[in-house]
Each structure stands twice: as C-alpha cells, then as structure tokens.
Image (cartoon, grey):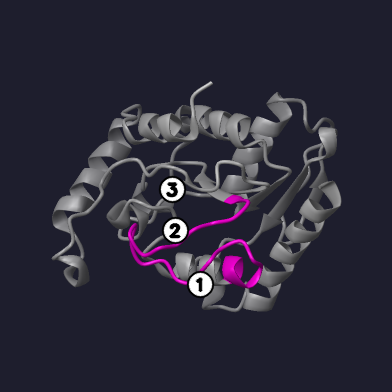
Amino acid sequence: MPTWNSLNRQIVGCDRCPRLRAHCERIATQKRKAYLDWEYWGRPVPNFGDPDARLLIVGLAPAAHGANRTGRMFTGDRSGEWLFRALHRAGFANQPTATDGDDGLQLDRCAITAACHCAPPDNKPTRDELDQCRPWLTATIDLAAPRVLLALGQIAWKATLDELQTRQLHTGRRPKFGHAAQVTLHGGRTLLGSYHPSQQNTFTGRLTEPMFDEVFATARKLIAEQA
C-alpha cells in the first residue's frame, strides 16, 4: 500500500484520460483574465488533508480556475469558500479561507478527495473517465480508513456508492442521493450526502449555510460516537 504522499504523487502523474489532460493544460495556458499572473497547476489535483482522516469528503472534480489553478482541492473558487467556512465552523479546519497552497490551511481528522482528479469540460467527466479515476478513490479509502464519508453532489454520491458496494460495505437496494442523506454501512461506517456548494446551488438558495452546517454537525456526532 502506498503512503499518503506517494499516493498523491501517483495521482499528480496520472495520464489515463487524454481529453481531461488536454483540457487542463489548455486552461492553464489560456487562463482567466483575473489570474493572468498565476502559473496554473494544470495537472491532476492530489488529495488534501489529514492522512488519518475520520471524515473523507468526496467532491466532483477540480474547478478549471480553482483547484486546476492552485493545485489544491476546493482552493481558489466560490465552492471552496463555502466548504472551508463550514469546515472551520465545525472544527475540521484551522481557518475559514483557502486562497493558495501556501496560505497555512490545515485540516484535522478530515481529508478531501474527488471522484475525478482533473478539471473536466463543463464540469462533466464521462463515465469512462470516472472509472479510470476510481482506483485513486479506492486507494484513498484504504489509506485513510475514514469512519464517515461525505459525498458532495450526485456524481460523487454515485462514485462513492460504487466503491462501497464493491467492498460490500453496502449491500441491497441503492439509496438515493439527497441533501443530509445518511446511510449506515457495514463495519460501523456511515455515508452522508450533501448538495454540492456550487454557485448553482448556493446562489439559488438550494443550499444554505445552516443546511451545510447541519451535515458537518452530523459528521462530528457520528465520529464522536465511533471514537
């Protein structure tokens, strides 16, 4: 089994999906006007957080001008602003902001991964691309052995459930995704669901900060019960 750092190096060096690699490199070259002075990351984005995470957050994929720019999950975009504020309020992060990889942000008992580690066009990885990326989720769960898994959005929910069912941590009828969905897994683990903190959800009020806080409060409670 690789270490956390060696796993991240393998993720960064992955070239299994030519369409995604070409897209990330193109975005890193073209850039957004506001970030012309940035040297974009433009590669697969590694996991971030505590290798001994009790809570593993599974996102969809890096944002083209967020993590694909900064090289760190949920860093440098509006979704990340929502996520790290919530993690800070819940005691999983030492600060509520995430601007770049050198901003001092640290996570405690929490790590962040993704169903797809490369920024996809229109935020829509193909089924094959998700399948190609799945071994990284497998290895991440093996290493961190989280007690609670939190899937942000329906694609992350499906990818996480696929992995959990392969491990036979969940059997029977597939549970539907929904905000604050909670699934008890074999072995004492729990799967939680939350709407993704995308602008599409936060600007429309589909996801509010109290709703997001409720999910992390549930995660803290479950971790405390399993300690």
Residue bearing the label numbered 1: 96
Residue bearing the label numbered 2: 74
- Check contact, mark 3 vs mark 1: CB within 8 A: no
Q: Secondary structure at mark 3?
A: loop
Quote the CA–CA distance across marks 2 and 3.
17 Å
In the image, 98 versus 171, the foreground residue is: 98
Q: Mark 3 or 1, which is nearer the eye? A: 1
The residue stretch that appears in magenta:
86-110
Q: In this rendering, is residue 112 above or below 166?
A: below
Circle 1 crowding by C-alpha within 10 Å: few under 14, some 14–19, many from 20: some
Q: Quadrant of the N terminus?
A: top right
> Is 39 within the magenta?
no
Name the mark on residue 124.
3
In the image, 207 versus 138, the foreground residue is: 138
The amino acid marked with disc number 1 is Pro
Q: Residue 65: x and y, percent?
A: 30, 60
Q: In this rendering, is residue 127 above or below 34?
A: above
Q: Residue at x 74, y 66 (%)?
A: 217
**Magenta segment, prevailing SS (helix, strand or loop):** loop
Q: Mark 2 or 3, which is nearer the eye? A: 2
